[in-house]
Image (spheres, coloured by chain):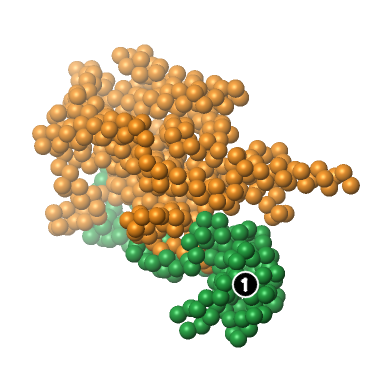
Amino acid sequence: MSKVIHAIYNDDDVLLDAVHKTRSAHHHIEEVYTPFPVHGLDKAMGLAPTRIAIAAFLYGLVGLSVATAMMNFIMISDWPQDIGGKPSFSYLQNMPAFVPIMFELTVFFAAHLMVITFYMRSKLWPFKQAENPDVRTTDDHFLMEVGIHGNEEELVSFFKTTGAVEVKVIEKH
Amino acid sequence: MSSHYEAPIRRPLVVGNKSYHDVTVDVARPVEGRANKLWWTVFTIALAAFLWGLGCMTYTITTGIGTWGLNKTVGWAWDITNFVWWVGIGHAGTLISAVLLLFRQKWRMAINRSAEAMTIFSVMQAGLFPIIHMGRPWLGYWVLPIPNQFGSLWVNFNSPLLWDVFAISTYLSVSLVFWWTGLLPDFAMIRDRAVTPFTKKIYSIVSFGWSGRAKDWQRFEEVSLVLAGLATPLVLSVHTIVSFDFATSIVPGWHTTILPPYFVAGAIFSGFAMVNTLLIIMRKVSNLEEYITVQHIELMNIVIMITGSIVGTAYITELFIAWYSGVEYEQYAFLNRATGPYWWSYWLMMSCNVFSPQFMWSKKLRTSITFSFIISIVVNIGMWFERFVIIVTSLHRDYLPSSWTMFQPTFVDAGIFIGTIGFFFVLFLLYSRSFPVIAQAEVKTILKTSGDNFKRARAQQDNNSDNH
């Protein structure tokens, strides 16, 4: 069991200032819950940039490879046919006809696997319980959660000066 | 406030002195409130049309394609016309949410959610037609890359019809996850406001436990951007591939290289018209006029005007190339379109698609709600006739004059088409009462830059500092 501070703000600019102040006062920000993406918040909190776009690129390459392998097997090696006077002897020569599906499967794999990765990493799926500590954080309030390490009094008075509309001490299980 | 700067010359995108909380309340209101009489009336009509269509589909499947007006020469008519029409309408949603996101057009935020919903619902209608036309839809899985009869003969990857299968299913599924991912924070907002345990439960399930952590938002924005980057070429590829159904054939009037860009422009054109049709009604019924402003409608009208002109240029280019080719069959195909027995559908198409959008050059007309609504309907009709002209008039006079015929639709043809319109509106009406119809989390991000109260306050501040 540990104690945390919940400092609640009602303006994104005040929140950003508060995050800067908290970081420069060397208090550890556990989490910030916001109703919409606050521009520059991740940098202010010192979050590492997400690598999900790189993952999407790799997933796209997987899709391209799957498409190539599939059509090469089906059209060239397993059952080659002469369609419209264009015999299926080599993948490279017949490739123009395969470009649409190579493209579609690249997009299909990149998009779906990226979204699945996002859902897994951010723990989003049906029947998952929401974890925002205050229901107002999906409306118009912004909540900063800061760990208390024996400095409760100091932290409470500190956050009162950052423009928080509410400062609460919460027992976290 | 400096990070929220926007040039004063830009008109506000959100009016009515909104605060963050006001946005929440306004977007949640249609979901939390009760449906009025008008909604129930329209819903009943749409449901009746849908059920009628369902009956016609059942009749087709149990009796056969012979219940349609097809004949030996015109073997493809309303089914493919409706298919292309619905796919075309389905292009605006992704265009608005993806292309306009890449171009950082903030006005998309008020309309992207509904445009995407429209996309998904209309692509579903489109998907029905190839399935019905199979005659034996229970064998629909034969279009998947599995060996024929589970033996060794496969589907043909040289066929544009198979490309269509991949293009449409990729488009539908990617649009769906793009839409749903954007919906998570807005469903979470409704969940956190829910009063009854039942609504709380439902919106908890559909919001996937969204909590709005800083890291989630960081990934959310990156995922949206990459999905937009993927969906932009995807949306262009889908109608390109649909046009290949015709362009790779050897039928005069179809075998043209202009078809892909011309189809894509036509799709954007018809899709934006349908978005205007739906949103002009919805902004009124759901009290969202302060978010979907006249400026939004005006911008949509400008897109309609430009794409309509592109389509017009394509029509004329097609005529020129037919003449210039020196191929008499090609020349006749186009002469027959304009002066043959189907001349009326050709000129209906020309006047609806090329002539009517030109009214939008006038500021007065393109900012008139009533006029915009009328034009949006006219464009929808025109674009249906465009596909009818391309398909039926190119087919009905074959190389052999002995096989020249006309196409006469039966009540089944009409019933299925009306049924899909009914189904589309059933889905859209249900959506408008259970989904957050505006991407409220995104609108909140632009409130300080583009809200009228914030813009006024900033102008005031600038004036004061000038006086020193």
Horizontal side, residue B17 vs residue B255: left or right:
right
Please state the horizontal and vertical placement of residue B445, each as a whole percent of the image: 58, 52
Quick one: B191 or A91, which is closer to the camera? B191
Quick one: B150 or A82, which is closer to the camera? B150
Which one of the lettered chains is coloured green?
A
Q: Is residue B350 above or below residue B39?
A: above
Residue at screen point 67% across, 80% down: A154
Residue at screen point 22% across, 20% down: B408
Which one of the lettered chains is coloured orange?
B
Residue at screen point 40% across, 17% down: B347
Please state the horizontal and vertical placement of residue B134, each as a whole percent of the image: 19, 40
Residue at screen point 49% across, 23% down: B370
Read off the residue under disc 1.
A46
Please state the horizontal and vertical placement of residue B121, each as a whole percent of the image: 34, 42
Residue pushed farthest bottom? Answer: A150
* Residue B335 visible, this orientation: no
Mark 1 secondary-structure assignment? loop
